[in-house]
Each structure stands twice: as C-alpha cells, then as structure tokens.
Amino acid sequence: MRGKFALLSLMALFVPSLALGLTYTSPVTTDGVVESSPPVLGGTEWETDEFIDSDGSTDFYFTWDSTHVYFAITGPYADLEEKPDGYEWFIAIDTDQKPGSGATMDGYGKVSFSGDFLPEFILYFAGGVGWYETSQWDSATSSWIWRGWTDSCSYGGWTENNTSEICIARSDFGNPDTVAVCSWITDEAQSQVVASYPSANLIGVVPVVMTYFWAVEGLVENVAPNTLPVRPTPPEAVVDNEHSYPFTCTVMADITPGDCGTSTQMVFYYTTDGSDPDTSTSSSVVGTFDSCRQGADTTDTYYAIIPAPDDATVRWIAKGVAKNGLVDVSDAIQEFIQGGTAWVGNAGSSPTTCTIWAEIYVGDGGQTTYIKFPYTTDGTDPRVSSTADTIDGIFDGQLGNNDKFYAELTSVPNGTIVNWYAFGVDANNNYAETDTFYTFEQGDTADIYNLICIPDSNYVMGEVAPKGIGAGMDFYWTTDGSNPKTSPTAHVAHGFFVEDTDTTGKFAAYLTADLGDTIKWYVHAWGSDNSFSDSPIQECVAGVTSGPELCNLTCVPDSLILRASISPRGYGAEITFYATHDGSDPRTSTTRVELSGSWIADVDVPGGDCTSPVGVFQVALPGSIAVGDTIKWYVHGWYQPHNKYNGLFGDSDVQACVATTSKAGIISDEVGGTIGTLINVPNPFAGSTNIVFALEQAGPVAISVYDVTGKKVATLFRGVAPQGKHTIVWDGRGESGNALPSGIYFFRLKSGNNVVMHKAMLLR
C-alpha cells in the first residue's frame, strides 16, 4: 500500500492465517438461478449474465444473493500477489445514490469521484490470499474511517493467479436496497490505473477520475447483472460496416466517432485455420487509414491485407480506437475464403512522360510475375479493340506484397488520347486484369497558378492542378542574379502543403536570402495525375535576411566539445560543425574537419543569446589536440526535406577558443557503428515493447521516440554501445513519465552519421 493507509496495510504481513487461502462461500441462489457445480472460479461458477465488463484483457464479474454481494476479476491484472509485477484491486460502493453525498476522493489518493455517484465504502483487495481492507466515509468529519481487514468468503489466486474473487456481506455496508458500483486496478506501486470498470472511466497515471458507475435499482433476485445501466450514459465507440474482399484478401471496417485518421486506429485480428479469432492470441495486421465521411459523427474507414494462402478460410474481427479514446470490437466474426486469383490494381499514368504502371498481388520480386499493357490511340476500348497494341511491363520494384511494373509509350505523339489497361500473372500463376481501362492525353502538363513572393519573410507560394494526393511543388532559387534553371548555385526547397482550394493544391516554402538580394525563382510542380511542368522564372527583392538562428555557440576547452543551437527547431533540423586546431580559418582551410552534430536536446524556452525555442547539437573534436592549440570553428545550420523550413540554411560567425587539455586519438561522433537492424517486438504493442537493434561495430548510439507530428517524446538511450545485438524496453511513457496515448510512433536510432527510423503502433 501507498498513501493514507500505507502503515495500516502493513498489518497484513503479521496475520498468521493469511498464509492459507480462504474458501469461497457459495451463494444459495444468484440472480434467481442455482449456481452450477463443480465450481470453476473458486466455489461458484460465474454465469454469462454476470460478466459485466472487460478492460485491459481482464474481465469483471458482479452478482448478489439475499445475503452477500460477489465480485471477481479474471485475466492478467487479477494477479494480486505482493510482488513487483503484481496488481492492486479496489471497489467503490455508493449506498445512497444521492448526488453530492459521499467522498470525492478515495482514501489512498489514487482516484477521485465526480458526477452523480459518490461512494461511502472503498474495498481494497491485495496479497492474493483472501483478505481485504474496508474504509467507510464519515460524512460528519468528511473523512475516511479505516474499518480493518476482513476475511469474509474471499479468495485470490485461482487458475495460476489469473482469477481473484471477493464476497461481501450486505450487512457490512448497511443492507442497502440500491447501490452504485465502480472498480479499478492499479499496478503494485499504485502509480498507474491499468484497468477500470465501467471501462468508460479513464485509466492512466494517478490520480484518475471515476465518473461512471453501475446503478443497481434493487438488490433483488431475477435481475441479470449484465443488464445494469451505466450512469451517466457514457460515450461510445462503434466498429461496424465490416467488409471482406476475397480476391485481394483485403478486409475493411469503420470506426465511429472518427477524425479522418488523426488519432483513430484499427487492428484486424485473424485466423486461417478455421478457429475463432480473438484480440489476445490471434495474429493481427495494423489497419491503414483509407477515408472518412461526415455525418452526425465522422466515420473513419481502415483496411488491411491479410497474409493468407490461397483457398484458406480467413476468419477475422476488427478492434478500433475511436476519436474519444474508447475501444470497440466487431460484434460478429467475419469469414471468407481467400480467392485464389491474382489482383492487378494501383494503376496510374504520367501524361507528361507517357508512362503507365500497375501492381500485381501476390508478387515475388519479378521472378515469375509479369504485367502487360494493351493500349489504343484511336479512341477505342483496348480490352476489345482489334487495333490495340500491347507492350510488356518493366519490373520496377516490390511494394509490400505487390510487384510494380511500368511501360513508356515512346511512339505516341503529343496531344494523343491514350486508352489502356493492364493484365498480369502473379507468383502463384493466377491471372487478373484491371477492373476498367484508363485514359490520358499524351503530353498534358500540370497547371501552375498564383505564384506569390512575400518579401517581408522571403516566403513563396504557388498552386498546382489537378489537386489531390500525389500533387506537389519544389521551389528553385538563386540570390546572385544567375538563372535558377541552369545555375550551379541554385538552391531547392521542397514545398510544404498549405491547403486545397476548390481546384488546386497550394504549397509554400521559406527561402534563404540576405536583405536586398534579388531572388530569382521558379517552381517545378506536379499534379495528382502525375503530370508535371515548370513555371516561368519569377523575381522579388528580399525584404529581410532569412535563415535559421544559430546561437549559444559554446566551446568547452577542457573536454574539447563544441555545442550550438538552431531555431526553428524540430524534427529534421541539423547542424554541421567545421573546425581547425592549428589556428587556420575553418571556412577556407584544407586542414579543417567537418563533423555532423549529434542532437542532445530540444529547449522549450529561449536562453542565452537565443530568441526562441531551439534544438541543441554538439560534437567531440577528433584527432590529437595539444594544450594551447587554438581551435577555430563555425557551424552550418540547415533542415532536411521533411521539415517545413527545408529552404532555410546559414552559417554562424567563426568562433575561437584555446584547448586547456591534451587528448590524443579522440573518437569523433562521426565514428559510428553501421546499423544492421532496428525493429520492435511486439508491434503493435500495449504496455511495453522490446526495441532490438544491432551494430556492426561499436560506436556512440542515441535512441529517441517521435510522434507523428515530428515531436520528440522520449529519449531511451544515449551512450556507447558495443558491437552486436542489443535490446531496450520502452513502456510507452514520455520524458516526464506520462503514459503516451495510442497512436503511431517512430523510433530513431543514430550512430555517428548513420540514422535509421522504425514505425510502431502503441495501443491503449
């Protein structure tokens, strides 16, 4: 125990009878039905209508008879043994159901209560040996009174500690006619609520608010407990509209309420041996967001391809996480027979280059698979036309389980309307073709509109049509008066998406320039149909000096470490250090070294000579350096293409310091181990996952976790790792120890210049 009753609960350690489990007292009748024998859970067999709720794979049971009330939990959280990986079980009972009457916080400081029901009794069950602790609310003093330990017909530890039960005499809490009940389970340290009942209540780092209770209008017989209402009525999550597509072994389901894939998730559990799938032992595939539709609530659709052999009987269910954080599972098992035919799809074309492509499932890397492309240029349907020509596809690459092929129609004149389709053979020698034929005009280009330069920020913007997924824009520019279409000094920034108008996609970029520079720029744009074109050259005069802020330039002479900060910070920000130790100018010297900075922190508030939040980088100088050597250095800050500021770059002024120590053969951060592996098991995961990585040689290692916005949420390891395979456990918590929400996260492993990313899904 931790909290108000921590000392009192230690009394359990000195009660001799606790060494033996106590026998569960079987009720005479429960919900009007004589219980079955022989017993399954303890001394009574729990009926299906006494199963009330499930949370975190642990089920909650509740029933009563004329003299007692009975509770049980069964599942991984039912292990109440006193040990580091054990759990603690609590039950709260409101005996008067009067709003505002009762406690607003339990006596252990772990949960608070809000809403219509405030409890007068708290039961705490731990140790796994049949004793529980009771506390009663004293409304006169507004405090809890500890009533001691009770051994009334309780037992913990059935079925290898996966079931615990408790039996309470109704007289122990005043023989009320009506009660309201909620329950929760914590870890052994009581730092985290891992399950709650009703499951609409929150879980997470304590304290947690309990709002929802089961309301029992009368403790009478002939009432099925699983029909008890939850008050207040909780929000819902609904998985429905399940569909199967046997020929492609694709499954699809909806989750409501949704938010167009921003926080919703779906996992598909399946079997291929005819058995029933469940969410704890069956194989699973993480769903891919497909689309959303608006209504009274937004509904998100997800799909997944099941890796099943031909003719296998696939049985599956879907488990979805809704926008409100609640979880639902398919009401019925879906079933289909994997179709035994190939599938050809994901077809597309590039009108500008007269190139067409398609994919075939199942692929084998182009060893036996193929796709052919029949086409016509006279307006006829290539599937039936006698004038159709056929060109063999060229293998392009594997995309998951699909093989992609393409073909370039080199003899088609500009302005020609091309009709085409694709057919192919998969790795199992099954045949398929596209569902329809496709049309494009050879030589068509993307349309570019509304090119704008805003000199006050050196911000440029443009629009491209057709809009949609796949559209984009790159910005090329010079500041030395040269032509950006031909100049070797031209820079490029990948435009970031701004918004869609009715007909176009809008993209923008920030350009590096000095105040007064003449910026010459143009865009290379491509539409959602893979057409592309270049704009005419534009001009504007820079109204500001733009680039990253490089600040807090620090030399630590007694450890020969260089440190610098960059703003705007964010995933994709980088700093390169240039240094000499012979007093020469690092901008021009042939003896200078170039060192990639190692990220060490993000700072949320300005400090030093920085005017905004920054990312901090550092390096250790390599080679042999003597006391008294003059170190001259500067930094170059820039952004990778996936950062919206990727058009910004710049150099700091040259810095100098004198070495106060002598070090020989210092290993640079550049000397990193080649990364052979980065995976996590399991994936998806709930609770914790093992991050497994391998280095081909020893070197410095930094492992961090980022969310889908690019924000770093956790640093898991920073140090030197030896050659070989290593495992680090992540428990799904952030930097401050908070449990992170369900969602997609990215593990970033950096060793020297080598960086590897890996995607994982956390489920709550």
Image (tube, rainbow, N blue to C red):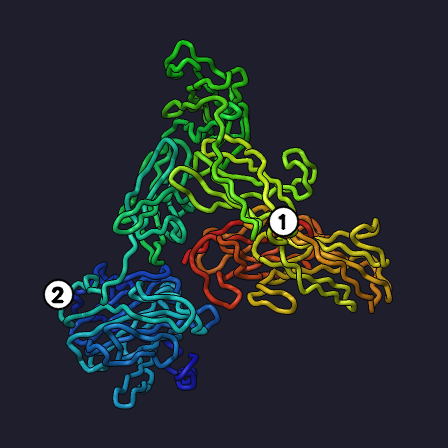
**The N terminus is located in which quarter?**
bottom left
Residue 245 in which image quadrant: top left
Give the foreground label among 1 and 2: 1
Where is residue 666? Give x, y as percent: 79, 59
Q: Amino acid at mark 1?
A: Thr
Where is residue 369? Give x, y as percent: 50, 25
Can you identify the residue that label 2 sits on?
A: 222
Q: Amino acid at mark 2?
A: Asn
Residue at image x 67%, y 57%?
598
Residue at image x 40%, y 75%?
127
Residue at image x 52%, y 19%?
409
Q: State whether residue 529 is above or below residue 128.
A: above
User: Residue 512: which numbered mark, if any?
Assistant: 1
Viewer-side residue, 691 vs 586: 586
- Looking at the image, residue 433 sits to the left or right of residue 177; the answer is right
Check disc 1 and report its element: helix, strand or loop.
loop
